[in-house]
Image: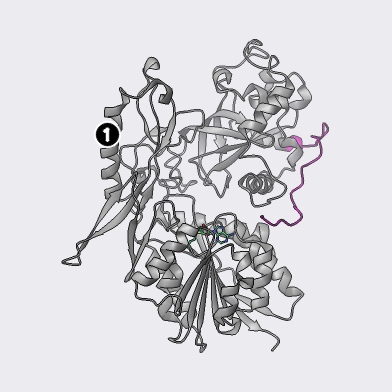
Amino acid sequence: MLWSRTSSIRRPAIASRHCDVTARFFSCYSATAIYMPTRQLPKRSISHNTTWPVTSEKSVLQKLKKVNRKKKRDTDDETKKSNILFLEIQDAVKSYNDMKNTRIDLSQLQNPIQLIGQFMFSRSRPQAIIESLDIIYQTSEGDGIGFVPKSLYASPFLEDDEDLFNKFTAIVVPKTIIGDKVKIRLNMHHEFYSEGVLLEVLNADSRKTARKDKLIVCNNFDKCSGCQFQMLSYDNQLKAKRETILKAYRFFYPDLLSQKDLSDFGHVHGCDQQYAYRTKLTPHYRIPKEHKNETLRIGLNNVDPSRPIVDIDDCAIATSSINGKLKEKREEISAEVGRAPLESQGRQRTLLLRESIRMNKETGDHKRVCLTDGVKVITEKVDDYIFQFDPSSFFQNNNVILPQVLDYIKYHIQLGEHKYKYLVDTYCGVGLFGIALSKEISKEGKIFGIELSEKSIEFATHNAKLNGLAVPDRIQFIPGTADSMFKHENFSKSGIQGEDSIVIMDPSRKGSTESFIKQLLEFKPKLIVYVSCNVFTQARDLSVFNDLQKNSSTKYKVREIVGFDFFPQTKHVETVAVLELIDSPT
Ligand SMILES: C[S@@+](CC[C@H](N)C(=O)[O-])C[C@H]1O[C@@H](n2cnc3c(N)ncnc32)[C@H](O)[C@@H]1O
C-alpha cells in the first residue's frame, strides 16, 4: 500500500463571484493582442440538441469522472500526475501575477460545469481558437501553460456573465515552451485548466523563445506523444530537466533546497547519444474495421487524445534494429488485415519490440537484433556483464548511459576511506546494480537483492551465475516486497550489517513506502543510493526520511542529487540521490 501524508493540496472554495482584478490588468492584457476566433461563435449558437444543456449536469460530471479518471486529483497520493499539474498551475499563476503585476487567484480559474460540458464531447466540441497565447510556464510533463481571460472565447457557452467577468482559463499546450507565442485550438476543459492543441508558433525565430524548429528531426513531432523537446538544443533540454528536479524538491522537500548549494543541485548529466538510443518500443495499432474503410496505423498515441494513433514508420529515438523490425511487423500485419475476423476488427493491440544481443558462441562476437512477440529471453550487455531477462521484466531502455550511471555510483562508493562489505540491492529487477557493482565490495562480503516479481528474481539469480558470482554465498536474490526485506529470515541469516553496507534503492514510479524508509533508517547503512525515474516521489520519500531522522539520533547528509538523461528529446529525467551516514549512536 502506498503510504500517504496529509495532503497539502487544498481545493479552493467555490469560485468567488467578486474577485478583484485591477483595471490595470485588463489594460496590459489587451496589449497582448489575444482576440476572439475569426469565426465568432454567437452566444448560445451551439445546437442544444447536440450539446449542453441536453447533457444534464449530472451526466457531464459522470462523463468527466470517467474521461478523467487518470487525470483526477487524488488526495491519497499527492505525487500523482494530476496533483502535480494542480501544483504547477498554482505556480504558473504566481509567475503570471509577477509578470503582469496582477493578483489572479485559483478560484478565478475554475471552469464552470457548463463550459466543461460544451467542450467534453469531441464530436460536438465547438471550434474555439485562441489566436495568440503567451506560454509563460513549463510543466514537468513538458507542456507549456498560458492564460487568457474567459471573456475572450467563452461568452457563447455561458449564460451567466458572472462566469466571465474577471475569470481566466489556464491552457496547457503540449509541444510548447516558455517564451513561445502560439495559436491554439481549445479542447477538453477540466476543473482548473483546459487543454490546448498547438496550431501555429507565431514567434518561432524570435529571441524570446529558445525554440529552434530546425532541430526537429521527426516528421511526426507535432502529433506524437513520444517526444516533447526536439525543438530545444540539447543544453536547453538538460536545463529544462534540471528545472523539473528543482521543482520536485521545492514541492515536496523544500528544506533540502535551502540546505544545499544550489549551483550543482539537480545538475543533469547528458547522454552521449541523443537519438537512436531507445532499446524498447511498444507501438500500438488498431485492427482496421473493413466496413468503415479504416487504414492501418501503427505507432504512438496522439498528443490530441481525440485523434487516432500517430502512424510511425521510423522512430527517431529508437535504435535502428527496432525500426527495422517495426517495418517488418507493419508488412506482416498489413498482409493480415483483410483476413481479420469481424470480432477482432477495431481492437487495440500493442507490439513489443525489444533489442537484444545475439552472441556467436564460436567467435564470441555479438550483434544487436530486435526481438518481438513470443520471445522468451532478451540478452543485454552492460560494461562487461551479461544480463538475461524475459520481455515482461523491467530493464533499463538506454544502455548508452548505463555505464555512466554505474561509474557515478562507483565514484561515490570509492569516495572516502570506508571499505564496504555489503551491497543491498532493493527493487533489484533482474539484478543490474547488484551484479554490475559487485566488484565494489570486499571479497569476503555479500550482495543481497529483493524484488517483487518472482520471474525477475529467477533471472537475477541466473544472471549472477552467468557472470560468475557464487549463489548464495556471494550473492543472493529473494522475491518479496522491499518492506519485508529487513525482517526476512534470509536477510537476518546473511549477517549483513548496516555500518558496512551500501543500500541501493530503485523503486518504480510510485516511489518507496514509509515502512521501508523507517526500516532503512533503523538499519543505518553507511551509504544510500536512491535511483529514481520519478523525481517527485523521490523528493517526497527523502523528505519523509528527513522527518524520521529528526526524531532519531541517526543522522544522514545528502551528498548529492543529480539527474541522468536516459531519454533525450523527452520530458523524462532519472535522478540519483546519494546519502551518507554522518552520525549514529554506537
Ligand atoms: C525501476 S525498476 C528497477 C529495477 C532494477 N533496479 C534495474 O535497474 O533494472 C523497479 C523494480 O521494482 C520492482 N518493485 C515494485 N514494487 C516493489 C516492491 N514493493 N518491493 C520490491 N520490488 C518492487 C518492480 O518489479 C521493478 O522491477
For image coordinates 73% across by 28% down, the residue present is 112
- Quarter of the image for residue 231 reads top left
Residue at the extreme left of the image, as rendered: 363
- Locate the N terminus by quadrant: bottom right
The answer to whether 375 is drawn above or below residue 481 in the figure is above
- Residue 559 in view here: no
> Of residues 364 and 342, which is closer to you in this image?
342
The answer to whether 192 is drawn above or below residue 236 in the figure is above
For image coordinates 51% across by 80% down, the residue present is 422
For image coordinates 59% across by 65% down, the residue present is 482
The answer to whether 527 is drawn above or below residue 99 in the figure is below
Question: Does residue 12 belong to the magenta stretch?
Answer: yes
- Quarter of the image for residue 59 reads top right
Percent position (x, y) of residue 51?
64, 16
Percent position (x, y) of residue 228?
46, 45
Amino acid type, residue under disc 1 in the picture: Glu
Percent position (x, y) of residue 325?
28, 43
- Residue 503 in view here: yes
Read off the residue under disc 1.
Answer: 332
For image coordinates 82% across by 34% down, the residue present is 16
Percent position (x, y) of residue 328?
25, 39
SS assignment at label 1: helix
Horizontal placement of 477 versus 337: left or right?
right
- How many neighbours does mark 1 have within 10 angstroms: few (below 14), some (14-19), or many (20 or more)? few
What's the magenta region?
1-24
Horizontal placement of 319 versus 38: left or right?
left
For the stretch drawn in magenta, the main secondary structure is loop
Figure label count: 1
